[in-house]
Image: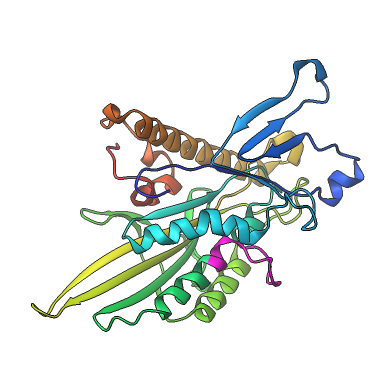
Amino acid sequence: MAGASVKVAVRVRPFNSRETGRNAKCVIQMQGNTTCISNPKQPKDGAKNFTFDYSYWSHTTVEDPSFACQKQVYKDIGEEMLLHSFEGYNVCIFAYGQTGAGKSYTMMGKQEPGQEGIIPQLCEDLFQRTGENTDPDLTYSVEVSYMEIYCERVRDLLNPKSQGTLRVREHPILGPYVEDLSKLAVTGFSDIRDLMDAGNKARTVAATNMNETSSRSHAVFTIVFTQKRRDQMTSLDTEKVSKISLVDLAGSERADSSGAKGTRLKEGANINKSLTTLGKVISALAEMQSNKKRKSDFIPYRDSVLTWLLKENLGKFKES
């Protein structure tokens, strides 16, 4: 989303081994930006159609002409966000869905050719574009941070030695921030890739029945992109700073399906509460986008650590 503009894309993945083993039936069909869902238990009810900004059919294989590959998803969503960041906007991409829905694959992907997700593709594209700059009065700098929010506590994924959780503070001008969070300067895509790999290994992952590598935390990869221009006439520098937040959300789940007990159940409750708050914030922003008169409406950013920290990306509106 750029400024307060909200776009929604949905994607359907192939069956996993668990679903194949149960002879699952695909109840989703997609055409253009329309997603059609049918209920095999209620065939008389007919299919339900939903229209989104993008509907990605990734259920089959690349041989299918309708198949949406990783590059296509980046071209539509990631590239647009990158262009907005060059204009100086703060932007944010969330991957949301149930445990095992394919969020991490869409955001991070795999290290095989053509399998890279939105985050590595965006980072590579960013350095490719800045590398083509021939203007001697224009310089770029890029800093990255990578954190996880686990049970409403923040952990630095780029500093594995920091055992404790970090405090969320608020700066009177810059807004909410995480105290002592590592922010590392990078000069090329290989630097970012190494940091991503280190951060991904440090993520809190616990097995659930739904998905044996289920991410139990929200992972927030942030790029602070600064463009500095020197005015030859006055010798003054002007800066344009954009914050790009790429978020792989924890999987939402029903406790009975995932077999959650004890710590797992508490984790699930925290995850679901924070996802509900995110849903409320985005709904309120979308409503304001369609109804310009309601700009004084309350937006519940402070109700979760995730939305509070991403307030600057989601939209600068009135909150608690």
> Looking at the image, can residue 138 be seen?
yes
Residue at 75% x, 52% y: name it. Answer: 65
Task: Give the magenta range.
Answer: 108-121
Q: Main secondary structure of the magenta part?
A: loop
Between 54 and 15, the one nearer to me in the picture? 54
Q: Would you say 134 lies left or right of 21 here?
A: left
Q: Quadrant of the C terminus?
A: top left
Q: Would you say 128 lies left or right of 19 here?
A: left
Residue at 27% x, 37% y: name it. Answer: 318
33 is within the stretch colored magenta: no
Q: Would you say 17 lies left or right of 241 here?
A: right
Which residue reaches farthest front? 65
Looking at the image, is 23 positioned above or below residue 146? above
Q: Give the quarter of the image for residue 197.
A: bottom right
109 is within the stretch colored magenta: yes
Looking at the image, is 279 positioned above or below residue 175? above
Q: Position of residue 128 (x, y in %)?
A: 47, 76
Q: How is the image coloured?
A: rainbow
Residue at 91% x, 45% y: name it. Answer: 21
Q: Position of residue 113 (x, y in %)?
A: 69, 72
Residue at 37% x, 51% y: name it. Answer: 313
Which residue reaches farthest top? 44
- Count numbered badges in the picture: 0
Q: Position of residue 88 (x, y in %)?
A: 31, 60
> Looking at the image, can residue 166 be seen?
no
